[in-house]
Amino acid sequence: MAAAEALAGLALALGLYALLYYNFIKGATCKNEASLRGKTVVITGGNTGIGKATALDLARRGARVILACRDRGRGESAVCDIRRESGNNEVLFMSLDLASFKSVRTFAAAFLRSEPRLDILINNAGVRTGSRSSDGFNLAFQVNHLSHFLLTHLLLERMKQCAPSRVVVVASSAHQRGKIDFQNIHKPVDGQLAGIQSYSNSKLANMLYTRELANRLEGTNVTCYAVHPGLVNTELFRHTLIWLKPLFLPICWLFLRDTTNGAQTSIYCATQEGIEKYSGRYFANCWLRDPKPHARDDALAKKLWEVSERMVGLAN
Ligand SMILES: NC(=O)c1ccc[n+]([C@@H]2O[C@H](COP(=O)([O-])OP(=O)(O)OC[C@H]3O[C@@H](n4cnc5c(N)ncnc54)[C@H](OP(=O)(O)O)[C@@H]3O)[C@@H](O)[C@H]2O)c1
Ligand SMILES: *[C@@H]1O[C@H](CO)[C@@H](O)[C@H](O)[C@H]1NC(C)=O
């Protein structure tokens, strides 16, 4: 009797989990089979997590994929994996450390010298800590926003020449809790909670940046999209809750999206035909989503752009 009850309980739990998994955890799949033969993709942080899964899919579609990563060992090892799994040998590592503006400039110069095309730029790399970068900025603000701002600026002319082309900005629903305080947003902070707040602020910056970029790109056939990938089981949480890890790991594995599913909206925004009219908008689960009102503030977006130009050394 007890065994039968236990079995029924288990079946119920599995059924509930399946319901939860297919309705909330897994998320939508990008269904198009667009070929990327002859196209070149740059993806920052393509060596692990959502970026690696995105790079693998785009390599399978035949693109030349450049993994722009800070660590040569991790980068080269991802190149091997992706070449093997996609059967595409045009996957390359190039060195890019987003914690340093100098590295961004060196990367862009090397890229423009060696690569004639750029069709898709995926600003994917991200960190969830507000410690000090080598340039003295808040790390999340520099890596997630400022350095991608500079990188995109330096590569944009090449993208215009290759239009139609696209910029995909991997933002986050964490932008909802973000604030743009121009006096402090760039300053390093201590502690986990402050680090998480810095992360949210930087993700709001991603949203505002994408909006303003779309305005500035009007008429160029270069379009851009902000993405929320879902809650994904990656290394993103490596700086947070370290002492909770043993408890955390099984929960992550059960209740967070895997990286293949987490990459779907980035892949959708990079490849889906017909979304060009939504340039500057926000996507989640391979569909348009309305961000919070403060992420649609065009005056704030414009001011952030000007402040960012000064911080990365593009304006006097
Ligand atoms: N996971 C989620 O639930 C979630 C939710 C919403 C949004 N996102 C966004 O998704 C994006 C990808 O994150 P993920 O979850 O895949 O995290 P991840 O597994 O930690 O991957 C982050 C990537 O960024 C790279 N990176 C970090 N600092 C860098 C630097 N200074 N220069 C160059 N690359 C750097 C990392 O390189 P190393 O391997 O060398 O550290 C890694 O390749 C991020 O923008 C994140 O904000 C994630
Ligand atoms: C943008 O694309 C359209 C349609 O393909 C084309 O007619 C137009 O000339 C393009 N504009 C630019 C600036 O490339």
Image: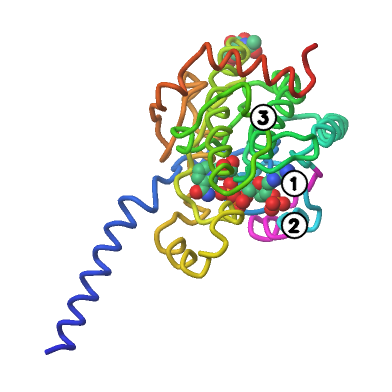
Whether residue 195 is visible, yes or no, is yes
Position of 73 compared to 194: left or right? Answer: right
10 Å neighbourhood of mark 1: few (<14), some, or many (≥20)?
Answer: many
Q: How far apart are the two marked residues, 3 and 2, measured between alpha carbons? A: 28 Å
Amino acid tagged 3? His
Whether residue 41 is visible, yes or no, is no
Considering only vertical position in the picture, is 155 above or below 244? above
Report the magenta residues as a range.
Answer: 80-95
Depth check, front residue: 288 or 246 = 246
In the picture, the disc for residue 85 is none
- Disc 1 within 8 angstroms of ligand 1 (CB): yes
Quarter assignment of residue 314: top right
**Would residue 187 be counted in the magenta stretch?**
no
**Would residue 87 be counted in the magenta stretch?**
yes
**Mark 1 touching mark 2, by CB under 8 A?**
yes
* Residue named by callout 2: 74
Foreground: disc 1 or disc 3: 3
Helix, strand or loop status at disc 1? strand
In the picture, the disc for residue 69 is 1
* Residue named by callout 3: 186
Considering only vertical position in the picture, is 19 above or below 125? below
Quarter assignment of residue 173: top left
**Mark 1 touching mark 3, by CB under 8 A?**
no
Q: How far apart are the two marked residues, 1 and 2, measured between alpha carbons? A: 8 Å
User: Could you tell which of marks 3 and 2 lies nearer the N-terminus?
Assistant: 2
Q: Position of residue 67 (x, y in %)?
A: 72, 45
Depth check, front residue: 283 or 114 = 283
Amino acid tagged 1? Cys
Foreground: disc 3 or disc 2: 3
Q: Position of residue 305 (x, y in %)?
A: 64, 17
10 Å neighbourhood of mark 3: few (<14), some, or many (≥20)?
Answer: many
